Image: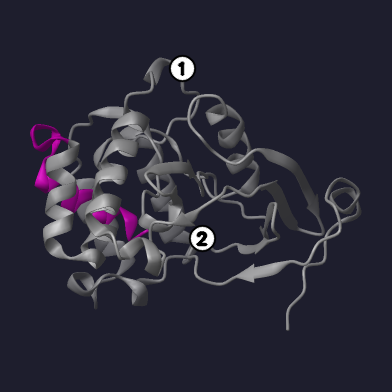
Amino acid sequence: MPTLDLPAPLRRVLPAARWEQVTDGESGAQVWRSTRYVVKVQPRTPFPGSTLQQERERLRWFAGRLPVPQVVAYEEEEGREYLAMTRLPGIPMSHPDAALHPERMVNLLARALRELHALPVRDCPFNMSLGIKLSLARERVAAGVVNDSDFDEERRGRSAVSVFNELARTRPPEDLVVTHGDACLPNFIVQGEYVEGLIDLGRAGIADRHTDLALAWRSTRHLGAAYADMLLGLYGRELVDMEKLKYYLLLDELF
């Protein structure tokens, strides 16, 4: 059974607790939780946009703007990053109990995305627009860290290089807003009739709204295709471009 081994500075600020490992995420980090806190642990990576230090910076910026976990501490030790934060009350939208109420979840998700995308772009210091994302994608492809065996079904058998080339060739104009960057159901915490907060904000920043809409639409399809379509209608059909939705799903394959 794995255990959480905290660096000394984190042991000094976190109370003694029974830590449970969370195994249902896909962020690449180990995630541990107690009744009051969450600790994320991952190897220090050379790729911008995927470090816990950057997640810490984004959490601090979002604080007071939208409900997010409060940063408790951040440490680096022996090539690993540690980010400690408060645990939000409630359950993720992907939880089986939440899935019993798909229409409610879709309504809450659409509302949360509209509220997020309404934040003033001029105030956000994090640029995750296509120029940045494609440059980072090129680095990841060149470094061989993209797992093309994990591509979605419609892209099985393709190489990361071919996906990147298509993205570069078909780059669309951008409709920039403040985005979550990984707007999947597990990253929205709900309790009753409310969204209690957003988590896993390491890729948040200024980007096209379809960065979020694409991943939210794909994630909501697990509730049923009708609910995914409902999400787009509730968000605002006039703002949705289905071709751009496909583009940003393709981009996500490289991250």
Tags 2 and 1 in contact by the CB under 8 Å rule? Answer: no
Furthest-front residue in this view? 192
Q: Is residue 18 visible?
A: yes
**Horizontal placement of 84 versus 213: left or right?**
right
Q: What stretch of residues is rendered in magenta?
A: 236-255
Inspect the magenta stretch and tell me whether residue 153 lies in it: no
In the rendered image, the vertical position of residue 226 relative to residue 73, given as above or below = below
Question: Quarter holding the N terminus?
Answer: bottom right
**Horizontal placement of 13 versus 80: left or right?**
right
**Residue 76 rendering spot, x and y as whole percentages:** 78, 50
Chief SS of the magenta region: helix
| Quarter where residue 7 is shown | bottom right
Inspect the magenta stretch and tell me whether residue 248 lies in it: yes
Mark-to-mark CA distance, 2 and 1:
27 Å
Taking the spot 32% from the left edge, 24% from the top edge, the residue there is 118
Question: Quarter holding the C terminus?
Answer: bottom left
Q: Which residue is mark 1?
A: 123
Q: Which residue is mark 2?
A: 27
The amino acid type, in three-letter code, at marker 2 is Ser
**Horizontal placement of 60 versus 11: left or right?**
left
Of 119 and 33, nearer the camera is 33
For label 2, the crowd category at 10 Å Cα-Cα, with few meaning under 14, some 14 to 19 and many 20 or more, is some
Taking the spot 58% from the left edge, 36% from the top edge, the residue there is 59
Taking the spot 69% from the left edge, 58% from the top edge, the residue there is 35
